[in-house]
C-alpha cells in the first residue's frame, strides 16, 4: 500500500498501486490551480482512497479536481469517463526513481519550466487528440 497526505495531514490517500511514471500538465487551468505545472502519478479509481475534508469542483465537462478543504493542497484530477486519477505527486514520499513520462500542453508552458529527460511532449492539439476530446469541450 502506498500512502500519502496533504500539507496539514487532514487528507490522506492510500493506493494499492500507482502508475510507474509521472506526468506534467502545463495547461492554463493546471497552472492557475497549482501555481506551476500539475505533476501527477496515475491511479485507478478501484485502487485509490482519499479520506478527510476533500473538496471538489467540476472543472470541465470531462474532469473534476480535488483539494484539501483545510490547507488547500492540490490532491487530484479525476476524469469523468473512467474515474481514473492524476494524483498530485507531492502527496507521496515514496516516489524516488519515477521518471517523467509525458508533458501535456507544452505549447502553453512558460519558457522557464523544463523537465529533464527524453519523454513525450505534447501540444494542446496532441493532448486533446490523445484523450479523444474535441476542441472547446
Image (tube, rainbow, N blue to C red):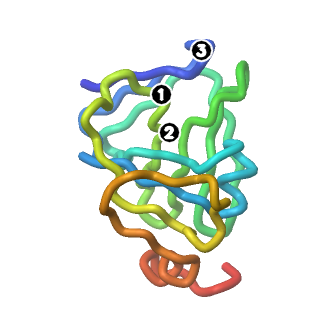
Confirm or deny contact between disc 1 and disc 2 (CB under 8 A). yes
* Viewer-closest of 77 and 41: 41
Alpha carbons under labels 3 and 2: distance apart: 15 Å
Q: Is residue 64 visible?
A: yes
Confirm or deny contact between disc 3 and disc 2 (CB under 8 A). no
Alpha carbons under labels 3 and 1: distance apart: 12 Å
The tally of labels here is: 3
Alpha carbons under labels 1 and 2: distance apart: 6 Å
Answer left or right for 94 relative to 68. Answer: left
Q: Position of residue 87 (x, y in %)?
A: 46, 42
Confirm or deny contact between disc 3 and disc 1 (CB under 8 A). no
Of the numbered discs 3 and 1, the one sitting upstream in the chain is: 3
Residue furthest front as drawn: 112
* Residue at numbered disc 2: 88
Dot 2 alpha-carbon crowd within 10 angstroms: few under 14, some 14 to 19, many 20 or more: many
Q: Which structural element holds mark 1?
A: helix
Mark number for residue 91?
A: 1
Of the numbered discs 3 and 2, the one sitting upstream in the chain is: 3
Q: Which structural element holds mark 3?
A: loop
Q: In which quarter of the image is residue 131?
A: bottom left
Mark number for residue 10?
A: 3
Amino acid at each position: 500500500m502506498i500512502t500519502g497526505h496533504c500539507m496539514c495531514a487532514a487528507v490522506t490517500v492510500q493506493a494499492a498501486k500507482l502508475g510507474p511514471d509521472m506526468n506534467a500538465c502545463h495547461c492554463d487551468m493546471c497552472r492557475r490551480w497549482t501555481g506551476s505545472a500539475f505533476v501527477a502519478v496515475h491511479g485507478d479509481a478501484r485502487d485509490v482512497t482519499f479520506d478527510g475534508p476533500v473538496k471538489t469542483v467540476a472543472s470541465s465537462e470531462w474532469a473534476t479536481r480535488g483539494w484539501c478543504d483545510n490547507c488547500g493542497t492540490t490532491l487530484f484530477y479525476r476524469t469523468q469517463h473512467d474515474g481514473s486519477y492524476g494524483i498530485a505527486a507531492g502527496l507521496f514520499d515514496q516516489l524516488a526513481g519515477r521518471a517523467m513520462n509525458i508533458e501535456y500542453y507544452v505549447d502553453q508552458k512558460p519558457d522557464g519550466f523544463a523537465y529533464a529527460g527524453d519523454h513525450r511532449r505534447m501540444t494542446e492539439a496532441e493532448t486533446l487528440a490523445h484523450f479523444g476530446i474535441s476542441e472547446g469541450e
